Image: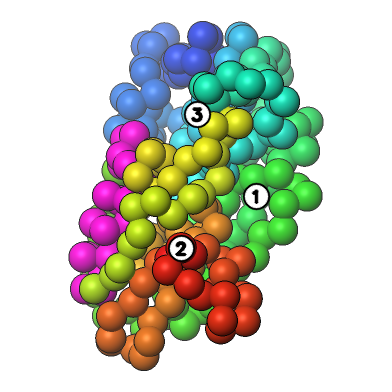
């Protein structure tokens, strides 16, 4: 029996050639179980939330990626909670994981956008402009690459501070700074949470990729000096618009 992927109820199982069933975590820990470009006889998605389907397929491709805070337009409602993402049910035969991922993204108007400065692939709506951060923010980082960065539902503010410390940057971050949210409820850097699994990134690369995904930017007075985090739109506004509320 050849390797197969089954994602049921948001849980991914990899069925290997030997008949063993590996969970997503086990499949990642044993990458030899499936080659990214291997054509799989069967890939099944059974009522899987879109973000989970994308993330599970992307993990099999084995690259550094991050999902945009909102993959589909938010429904207009008055609920205090996030708007549920659509459920996906698909059955593909003789496709590799990268091929299935690209088909899924195309079906939902999504794309892969890579910032060469960070090497992190951002998965976002095709119509959303993928604006790369200035290369000098991530370039010139003399800190060694971090073997693995794993964040599981970590508050965005904590993730930013942790990566800034690894990059040896003294940053100022307003805990009430607003960021894009997955639903109608407003989010801030203190309430939004981050889940990523990255390999081999330098601290500044990881920090810039994280900020970029939430429309934030790192502004330095001068190289090596203190810096602050602010909304990208505020950074691009005239200097008079850089008030405390925007940082």
Residue located 35% across and 59% down the image:
174
Residue located 33% across and 26% down the image:
25
Q: Quadrant of residue 237?
A: bottom right
Residue 74: % across, % down: 68, 31
Q: Gap between marks 2 and 1, in whole Å?
A: 32 Å
Earlier in the chain: of badge 2 and badge 1, it is: 1
**Residue stretch in magenta:** 151-169
Please tell me which residue lies in front, 217 or 177. 177
Residue 230: % across, % down: 46, 66
Residue located 46% across and 18% down the image:
12
The answer to whether any part of residue 69 appears in the image is yes
Q: Gap between marks 3 and 2, in whole Å?
A: 37 Å
The vertical placement of 44 against 233, above or below, is above
The tag on residue 245 is: 2
Q: Gap between marks 1 and 3, in whole Å?
A: 15 Å
The tag on residue 112 is: 1
The tag on residue 56 is: 3
**Is residue 95 a member of the stretch shown in magenta?**
no
The secondary element bearing badge 2 is classed as helix
Earlier in the chain: of badge 1 and badge 3, it is: 3
Is disc 2 surrounded by few (<14), some (14 to 19) or many (20+) residues within 10 Å?
A: few
The vertical placement of 188 against 1, above or below, is below
**Closer to viewer: mark 3 or mark 2:** 2
Whether residues under marks 1 and 3 lie with C-beta atoms below 8 angstroms apart, the answer is no
Earlier in the chain: of badge 3 and badge 2, it is: 3
**Closer to viewer: mark 2 or mark 1:** 2
């Amino acid at each position: 029996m050849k390797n197969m992927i089954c994602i049921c109820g948001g849980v991914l199982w990899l069925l290997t050639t030997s008949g063993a069933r590996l969970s997503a975590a086990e499949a990642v820990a044993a990458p030899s179980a499936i080659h990214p470009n291997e054509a799989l006889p069967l890939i099944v998605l059974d009522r899987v939330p879109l973000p989970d389907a994308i993330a599970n397929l992307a993990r099999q491709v084995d690259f550094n990626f991050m999902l945009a805070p909102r993959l589909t337009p938010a429904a207009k409602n008055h609920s205090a909670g996030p708007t549920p993402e659509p459920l996906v049910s698909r059955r593909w035969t003789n496709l590799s994981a990268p091929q299935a991922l690209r088909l899924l993204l195309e079906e939902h108007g999504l794309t892969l956008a890579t910032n060469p400065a960070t090497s992190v692939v951002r998965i976002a709506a095709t119509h959303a402009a993928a604006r790369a951060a200035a290369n000098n923010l991530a370039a010139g980082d003399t800190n060694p690459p971090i073997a693995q960065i794993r964040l599981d539902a970590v508050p965005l503010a904590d993730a930013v501070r942790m990566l800034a410390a690894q990059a040896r940057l003294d940053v100022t971050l307003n805990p009430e700074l607003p960021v894009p949210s997955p639903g109608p409820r407003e989010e801030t850097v203190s309430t939004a949470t981050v889940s990523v699994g990255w390999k081999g990134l330098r601290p500044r690369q990881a920090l810039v990729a994280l900020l970029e995904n939430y429309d934030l930017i790192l502004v330095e007075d001068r190289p090596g000096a203190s810096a602050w985090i602010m909304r990208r739109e505020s950074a691009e506004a005239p200097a008079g618009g850089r008030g405390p509320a925007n940082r």
